[in-house]
Amino acid sequence: MFDLTFYLLIFLSVYVQVFFFVTFLENRRKIVTRIANIKLKHYPAVTIAVPIFNEEKTVAQTINSILKLNYPKDKLKLILVDDGSTDKSFDVISRFARYPNIKILQKANGGKHTALNLALEHTDTEFFGGIDADSFAHPESLVRMLEYFERGPEIMAVAPSVTVHEPKNFIQHAQKTEYHMGIYFKKMLCFLDAINVTPGPMTIFRKKVFEDLGHYREGHNTEDMEIAYRMQKHGYRIENCNDAYVFTNTPSSVRKLFRQRLRWIYGFINNTIDYRDVLFRKKYGNFAFFTLPMGIISIISVCYLFFRIVYNFFDFLYLKITTWEAVGLHLSNNIKAPDLFFLNVNSYLLLVVFIYTLILFAIIFGRKMAKERRYLSLRMLYFFPVFGIVAPFWLLKAVYNTILTRKPDWR
């Protein structure tokens, strides 16, 4: 039974990676990274909200990055919402009160979704987006995303490519590799019309989305995921602009990374439960038949492999202890060199190598899409020990919290 389950999960993992790769091969000519400035046929008015809670160290840089966007200043509005900060964030944003296109609001702490909703109530433009107060937009990011909306009225939201801002340590470099891989996967999901997250760092929406479907919801502390689920359920198309770059600060320690990813995975599990009526329904397309099942399979696979590794370790330990008790402990001086003849080359090993080859391809091509100077870097390898060792624990914790209905903290 163990072997059957194991090989089934390996097969599904291979299927997912091959599906992404085939999607890439079919659509590779559509992946365009623009270098020169572009001009729109029409420059619509856009409002960008900055929800702020205790971000005194980064919020000024965030606001300045928006002010430096290559977009007509009379068409760009900013709404800064202080969500009950207890540090000097409000003092920092108050310095921007002199700008005619900036509105500053203050409210009691209620969570990010409430800050965004307050901004929506003060928005009268055709387009709306939010940006986290620890993220920074590339000057061309907004105009590149707005160009996608010119391609048709059916496009209701455009997500950017999010990457890591100035990584400083081993943990942050590992996350940078993960974000590069995410750029690749997000574009493939775009081709499949199956995006499940509209990232907090500056996804742009037609305001009609919120007029039709309602404002942001708490969404288990993942409001950017919940609104994407809602849009997919109602047939609202989400695009990805791979050359609209937004840079974000990431957790600098394993503890902080664990808490962030616990919240993300908990959000995925519980939003999927909330929208379970979407699963395997033909009318919802690849979102229902690929994106959500892929996420569920990933969680099941990691949990299963973790328990199998633990079981095999203790089974091996028990066997050795039993052997030592029976015949005693004998250390031999006659240690032979390993013989390549006994190297395990069964189908399982080959499949694992194949999976990791496709993952490496996703990372490398993601780096290319992110305009990294070098497509290959030894720091890419940081991803594997960090996420290979720690990720099973936040996945298991998210499942545990879901079973016991324990909502993780935001930070």
Image: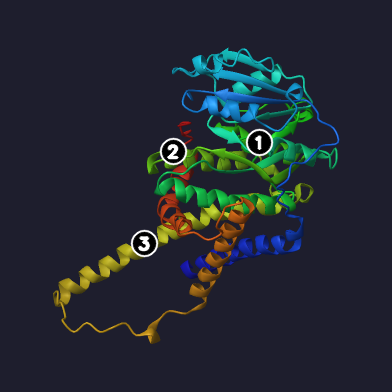
Give the tally of numbered discs.
Answer: 3
Between 185 and 324, the one nearer to me in the picture: 185
Taking the view exactly as shown, the residue that stands out farthest to the front is 36
Residue 120 left/right relative to 364: right
Residues at badges 3 and 1 in contact (C-beta under 8 Å)? no
| Number of the label disc, if any, that sits on residue 139 | 1
Using the rendered image of the protein, determine whether residue 84 is visible from the camera's viewpoint: no
Query: Which residue, given by chain and number where applicable, does mark 3 sit on?
Result: 311
- State which mark lies toward you, 3 or 2: 2
Of mark 3 and mark 1, the one earlier in the sequence is: 1
Disc 1 is placed on an element classified as: loop
Label 1 vs 2, first from the N-terminus: 1
Expressed as whole percent of the image width and height from the top left, the position of residue 46 reads 74, 27
In 3D space, how far apart are the residues under numbered discs 1 and 2 (Cα atoms)?
31 Å
Does 297 appear above or below 325? above
Q: Is residue 269 above or below residue 383?
A: above
Q: Nearer the viewer, mark 1 or mark 2?
A: 1
Q: Which residue is mark 2?
A: 259
Query: Which residue: 68% across, 51% down?
Result: 187
Label 3 Cα neighbours within 10 Å, binned few <14 / some 14-19 / many ≥20: few
